[in-house]
Image (cartoon, rainbow, N blue to C red):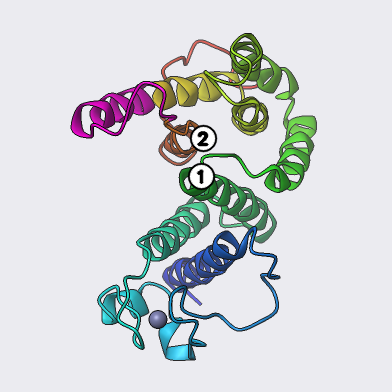
Amino acid sequence: MTPTFFAALSAVFGAALGSYLNVVLFRFGTGKSSLRGRSQCQHCKTALRAGDLVPVFSYVFLRGKCRYCRSHISFQYPVVEIAAAVLALLIYLQHPGFLVFSFWLLVWMILLFIAAYDTRYKIISASAFLPLGALALGFAAMQGTFFSGIMLSAPLFVASLLSRGRAMGFGDGFLELSLGWLLGLSAGLTALMLAFWTGGVVGIALLLSQKRYTMKSEVPLAPFLILGAAAVHFFHVDFFPSLPSLF
Ligand SMILES: [Zn+2]
């Protein structure tokens, strides 16, 4: 049982969790329970067999098409599976202890779900907030980062209040509250700046490249907030080392 073995195991487990997240993402709002019922093709409704459901590999092997009706399989499947595998691996490398690993794995799977859900449906899933908020608040109570969350999310709440949710959704404020609790002040502020920069660049690129994108089209902010959080959590980017890390 070498660390390499556990690292590989984490990645495989992460890919399986990503596969489950995909199922939840697609069945959301269709009234079907994500736990019951067999997975089926979105188009021809053929029940999928075990060989069609291997994370990443099935998508590559089937060249992104359904085995039965040859229709296109959403690119979301392999992207979420690969992201979940990479996250689980990074978490293991950073927090190999079982309890801490489990805590961060749970947190990051919820964050990945929120990012994918916001990209797909342009809204933050309210049902993901309760577990994320509870985990983040528990963490803040132990680490003393309670005010970091309040300070970092306050500008987002004000922006959504003033614009009545048009410039920024209230969901983004709630997400930032949890991220501030989880990251602390200096890392959280760095993550927020990274989110606005990358989100701004992508937003401008979309505006220039596609005519159907207008200033009114919402570029979802949550995936960028979460990407920024990943950069500071896993790669220790910190623009404000003089600020208190925990506050
Ligand atoms: Zn099909």
Q: Is residue 43 above or below residue 51?
A: above
| Residue at left offset 42%, top offset 36% | 231
**Ligand 1 quarter of the rendering:** bottom left
Q: Is residue 150 visible?
A: yes
- Label 2, secondary structure: give it: helix
Query: Which residues are drawn in magenta?
Result: 197-218
Does residue 137 appear to the left or right of 96 in the view shown?
Answer: right
Does residue 222 appear to the left or right of 208 in the view shown?
Answer: right
| Residue at left offset 50%, top offset 10% | 242
Q: Is residue 247 visible?
A: no
| Residue at left offset 44%, top offset 33% | 224
Residue 115 badge: 1
- Label 1, secondary structure: give it: helix
Judge whether residue 193 is colored magenta: no
Image spot of residue 71 (x, y percent): 32, 75
Relative to the observer, which residue lies in front, 32 or 44? Answer: 44
Q: Quadrant of residue 155?
A: top right
Q: Amino acid at mark 2?
A: Ala
**Crowd band around label 2 with a 10 angstrom C-alpha radius: few (<14), some (14–19), many (20+):** many
Q: Is residue 150 above or below residue 107?
A: above
Does residue 183 appear to the left or right of 4 in the view shown?
Answer: right
Residue 222 badge: 2
Judge whether residue 207 is colored magenta: yes
Contact? badges 1 and 2 (CB < 8 Å): yes
Image spot of residue 166 (x, y percent): 55, 20
Task: Point out the tag, 1 or 2, that comes first from the N-terminus.
Answer: 1
